[in-house]
Image (tube, rainbow, N blue to C red):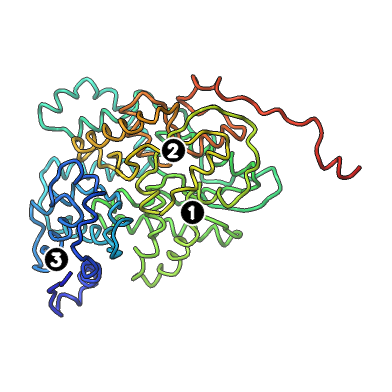
Amino acid sequence: MQTNFTPEQLKDPRTAEADRILRRCVHCGLCTAVCSTYVVVGDERDSPRGRIYLMKDMFERGRDASPEVQHHIDRCLSCLSCMTTCPGGVDYMHLVDLARVHINETGTRSLKDRFMRRLLAAVVPYPEKFRMALKAAPLGRPFIPLMRALGLKEMAAMMELAPARLPALPKYEGPGEARTSAERRARVVMLAGCAQPVLRPEINDATIRLLARRGVDVVVANGAGCCGALVHHMGEEQQALEQVRRNVDAWMKEKTKGPIDAIIINASGCGTTVKDYGYMLRHDKDYAERAAEVSRLTKDITEFLSEYDLGPPVRWSSLRVAYHSACSMQHGQGITEEPKALLTNAGFTVVSPPEGHICCGSAGTYNIMQPELAKELRTRKVKNIRSVKPDVVAAGNIGCITQLAAGMEIPIAHTVELLDWAYGGPVPRGLEKLADFMSDVPQPKADHRAFLRS
């Protein structure tokens, strides 16, 4: 793509980066076929190619964000399906991030929009605040029809997504270190997360149990918090970078206490962002090197487990598992086969629903800020999941789990919860009716090593 930035404009690092990315686009349009919003609405401006034209015009002319640009960029899920399809390697992820910052700094939003964004940014990244908000949410449920009538569709969507009852607190609540009782093989730092330990604390518990059985010490670092993704995707650049720096400080401090083999992420949306820390802080001379090291060390839990021999499962299952690959997992991190292989090795029958590249509509806070599109995408995704007739759905991202659970009767759990169950852990919450389909594997009465010594 030919660009027309002036030498003066290119002195600005953001503009220079936008120019670098834009020049790789060849207008081929292959991205339109895999774009979740374009597939639903059919508007060229809601496709990656169309949004690229809008962003190019905005950046080149040095304009404040227009309502049109803002509308179509806001409707982008950042599913990144376009990036795995693009033959030219266009870095759409970072281009749309630049546009969101520009929109946040120059655009004009309604009072309602500003309020919702500030509310989400002030509550969701902080587990205690988020837990308190969810406890109060049932009080607002009776008013959902009124909210819709008043045009408060985002508030109504938020109330609908809130669980009717909060789960118990996690067994392993950081900061702290969970040490294995087996022979120690590795030491990892785990991102505890912000929304996940409130909505489904069992995910962190299952992660720690599964790692401990394989000789892995798990550290939840003091001072670490939200990965920064939520405010980053709202264009709140400074707030996002503050959260990124805090995590880099906390995790690198743990490295001074002993070697770190990996930084474990069990929410793929967070993993995509943490793996990008090196890029996000590349111009910060005080953090660039350490942030790059954090990105290098970061692995999704399934990515890490696939490098270890988990051995045979202690339980056998006839359950049919539909694996839903979160966009942030398959497109953001390029992890496609590892989770399915782990589930298969654990004894499950794994099936892949059609249109696996299309987003479920979660996308961070998208299902709150864009509820109509999010529901359309969820309906489409659920239809495809039902078509493979699974007993249970597995996913590697809390956003997808929350989104899909609100729209289907099929139980859903995190991949690591199913693995933990197969290797000796408890029945995942919501799967109690399936417990009879999991049987203990008979264990030999003697250890083979005793025979070798005889």
Which mark identifies residue 299?
Answer: 1
Query: Does residue 439 sit above or below 59 in this rendering?
Result: above
Q: Amino acid at mark 1?
A: Lys
- In space, the residues marked 3 and 2 are separated at their CA atoms by 39 Å
Q: Amino acid at mark 2?
A: Pro
What secondary structure is marked by label 1? strand
What secondary structure is marked by label 2? helix
The reply, left or right, for residue 393 in relation to residue 372 is: right
Judge depth for marks 3 and 2 and give the one in front. Answer: 3
Residue 373 picture quarter? top left
Which comes sooner in the sequence, label 2 or label 1? 2
Q: Residue at x 42, y 45 (%)?
A: 267
Q: Amino acid at mark 3?
A: Phe
Q: Residue 304: x, y in percent?
A: 54, 51
Which comes sooner in the sequence, label 3 or label 1? 3
Disc 3 vs disc 1: Cβ atoms closer than 8 Å?
no
Q: Which residue is mark 3?
A: 59
Which mark identifies residue 197?
Answer: 2
Q: Residue 256: x, y in percent?
A: 57, 62
- In space, the residues marked 2 and 1 are separated at their CA atoms by 19 Å
Query: Does residue 57 sit above or below 135 in this rendering?
Result: below
Q: Residue 242: x, y in percent?
A: 34, 58
Which comes sooner in the sequence, label 3 or label 2? 3
Query: Does residue 344 sit above or below 134 in this rendering?
Result: below
Q: Quadrant of the N terminus?
A: bottom left
Q: For the residue carrying disc 2, how many other residues have a C-alpha within 10 Å: few (<14), some (14-19), or many (20+)?
A: many
What secondary structure is marked by label 3? helix
Which mark identifies residue 335?
Answer: none
Disc 2 vs disc 1: Cβ atoms closer than 8 Å?
no
* Front position in the image: 389 or 244: 389
